[in-house]
Image (cartoon, grey):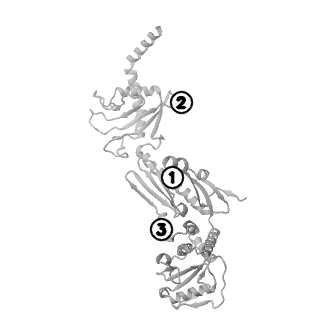
Amino acid sequence: MQETTIEYIKDKDITIDSIKRRLCEVALDIKKNNKINLTDINVICEEIFGKILNEIFDINLVSMSAEVSGNFIAVDLIDYDKKIAFQVTSRSDRKKIENTIEKFNKSDISKQIDRLNILILDDQEHTYYKPEKTTLANNNEFSFKDNIYNFRKITDLIRERNERENGFIIKIYDDINMVFDSGRIKYFSIVKNTELLTSDVYYESDETAIWKHGYGDIQLTAFIPLTYEKKISCLLEFRQHDIAAAYITFDQERLLQDYFVEEDEFKTKHNVGRYVDEEMLYMQIENVRLNINAHTGYHIFKLFSELKDQYFESKKLIDKKLGTEAIRKIEDKYCMMTINKQQWNEILFFARKHDWFSDDGECEWNIFNNNWSNNSLILFPNVHDEIRGDILAKISVDYSRENISMLDVFWEPGFKFDKRSMEGFDNLVKWKADYTLDWMKNKLLPEAQDFYKNNNHNNNSNMSLLKKIFRKI
């Protein structure tokens, strides 16, 4: 019975053996398709191996199959500037190679190219009878030793390059995976799609930032809030041909609950599993079960991790502007403090005697709009005062606590018609949460308590008298 795992294929797991294995799988697919005259994958492989050769040799090979209709005579890939050409083939016999050289010599392309190379898509060691060299029509030599490459030579070059450039193996591994993602379609569309899915975008538009990041096989596009009113949402897009039309969307609740989590939790929630000796991983993303390369699965986790960092960085800036950095958020409100019910009653009593419409000379305190609500206050500037700024904020309490004698006090941002949601938080136009908290602790609570004691005496006497009457009755 095969061993299974929910692990990704991470960057550190990719070795030169991973490259060899994938290359041999490509060669096997080509041979199978050629037997039944399905040659689309040949065109695809020309482009993919062109990309790999470009990475290895720092050249710019262009696929002739993508550039012109039908097969270009003699060669598949050309770098006109450096005058290098490659023919990609699954056949390794000398007759095939000599036939390629003959076509090359007879074509006009030989006048534009100095060096002809042949890439054989297998891992076998090939030996050829002499002569070992032959002269091309352009008077340059073709060597059966130096100008013929196979997977063994290619992987040796990749290994050498990786020693100089860390991460080179990973880049090549992902290039090869494009073959398996393609699904026998025109390769040009795969190249274009891969380029699109590697684009990085970040720009701020009004109250939302557009964030886009990808690895070529997948891409995540997100709308990140720049205000306390907006919420994050995102969309996941794939290159893999059989799921390329699947655009999976996520809202803030799902992201915070299931995707902005640590790696172990992410794997538990989303990785169904794969066989240890295979590279395809089943993943559950929302209500869709996907069968994808395990390295692509790792890219999915990385993208959500990167988006999480970007989201919380944006949230940190919002909190700083609102003064809510050290204040706990519960749904859309910020819990400033906990007070007892008597303190809240004193605040209500004080607020109702200091309405924002009052004209009794106490402009500093006549800032409350209560509308006889038992659970909220809105702070407004007094209409009779010289306007030094607009006092805007909302204070409310939650009666849902188990201990009804204690109440959580919440702060919400104030609203002003001529200001955007994130404008005016200077403790004049709009009061920040930390400023409001300090004001409540050090000014409002003491003031309200003294006012209640000094002005509620008659009410208390009347209540005591009524209680005595009721007892007698």
On residue 308, which mark appears? 1
Label 1: how many Cα within 10 Å (few below 14, some 14–19, many 20+): some
Amino acid beneath label 1: Lys
Q: Amino acid at mark 3?
A: Lys
Looking at the rendered structure, the secondary structure element under dot 3 is helix
**C-alpha distance separating marks 3 and 2:** 59 Å
Q: Nearer the viewer, mark 1 or mark 3?
A: 3
Sequence order check: which comes first, mark 3 or mark 2?
A: 3
* Residues packed near mark 3 inside 10 Å, few (<14), some (14 to 19) or many (20 plus): few
**Dot 2 and dot 1 residues touching (CB under 8 Å):** no
* Quarter of the N terminus within the rendering: bottom right
**Above/below status of 467 relative to 79:** above
Direction from residue 209 to residue 92 in the image, left or right: right
The extreme right residue here reads 1
Q: Amino acid type of disc 2?
A: Glu
How crowded pointer 2 is (Cα within 10 Å; few <14, some 14-19, many 20+) is rated as few
* Residue at the image point whose x is 67% and y is 60% from the top: 276
Residue 344 drawn above or below residue 130: above
Residue 321, position in %: x, y? 40, 46
Q: Which residue is mark 2?
A: 402
In the foreground, 367 or 49: 49
Q: Which residue is mark 3?
A: 192
Residue 389 at x, y = what percent?
31, 39
